[in-house]
Image (cartoon, rainbow, N blue to C red):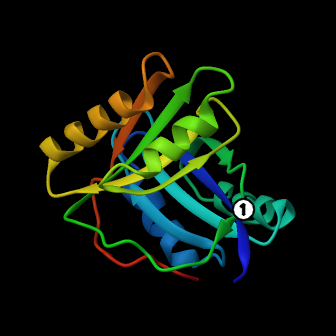
Amino acid sequence: MREMKKAFVLLKTELGTGDYSLKEIRKLKIPGVTEIHSITGRHDIIVEVIGDDMDEIKEIVEQIRKVSHLTSTETFMCQEKIPEGPEKPRKEALAYVLITTRPADELKVVETVRKVEGVLEALPTWGNWDIFSQITADDMEAFKGIVKEIVQKAGKGKIQNTLTLIVVEQKDKKKKTS
C-alpha cells in the first residue's frame, strides 16, 4: 500500500469572489488535489492535497496560489504519511475541525479524535493548528455534539482551541481525484 504526504490549504478570496475561485481551481484539475470545498469562517475555501513528497506538495500549492482573486493562503502539512485505503461513508453534512492542543499533547489528542463517531480522519499538522480533522454528520446540531465529544474525550485542558469550518457546498459526495 502506497503512503502519501498530505496538506491542507486554506484560502481567502476577495470579497464576493469565493465561488469564482473555487470553480477556477476545479477547472484546472490539478493532479494531487483531492478535495475542494467552500467553507464558513475566516477562510473561504479549503483544498486537500496529496503527493509523494514535500516537493510535489509545494508544486501543487504553487499552482493553487496562481488562481485569481486569492488574498491569502495558509498551508498545513501533515506530520505523518497517509496510507491509501477505503473511504469512510459520508453523511449529509461535512466539516473540518481544526484543533490546537497543549504542547506535546497533539499525538494523544489525535488518537482520541480518531475514535469519535463521525470523524472521517484526524491528522497532526505543523502550523498554528495542531490537528486537522474531517467530520460528517446528518445536520448542524450533530456537528456540535461531535465537537463536544472530541473535547470531552481528549481530557481536561489538552485541547486549547477549536475552529469548525462548515462545508457550505457539497456537490460531489465522492472525493475528487485527479
Q: Residue at x 54, y 71 (%)?
A: 34
Outermost right residue: 55
Q: Amino acid at mark 1?
A: Lys
Q: Nearer the viewer, residue 86 or 37?
A: 86
Please provide percent x and percent y for residue 9: 59, 51
Query: Split into 4 quadrants, where in the image is the C terminus?
Result: bottom right
* Residue 148 against residue 19 in the figure, above or below: above
Please provide percent x and percent y for residue 43: 45, 39
Please provide percent x and percent y for residue 53: 83, 66
Outermost top residue: 157
* Residue 39 against residue 145 in the figure, above or below: below
Q: Does 98 sit left or right of 165 as displayed?
A: right
Q: Which residue is mark 1?
A: 81
Q: Residue at x 29, y 66 (%)?
A: 170
Q: Does 115 sit left or right of 147 as displayed?
A: right
Q: Quadrant of residue 44?
A: top left
* Residue 90 against residue 121 in the figure, above or below: below
Label 1's element?
Answer: loop
Please provide percent x and percent y for residue 117: 30, 54
Q: Does 79 sit left or right of 117 as displayed?
A: right
Q: Nearer the viewer, residue 44 or 34?
A: 34
Q: Callout 1: few (<14), some (14-19), or many (20+) C-alpha neighbours within 10 Å?
A: some
Q: Residue at x 86, y 63 (%)?
A: 55
Q: Can residue 13 be seen here?
A: no
Q: Residue at x 54, y 27 (%)?
A: 100
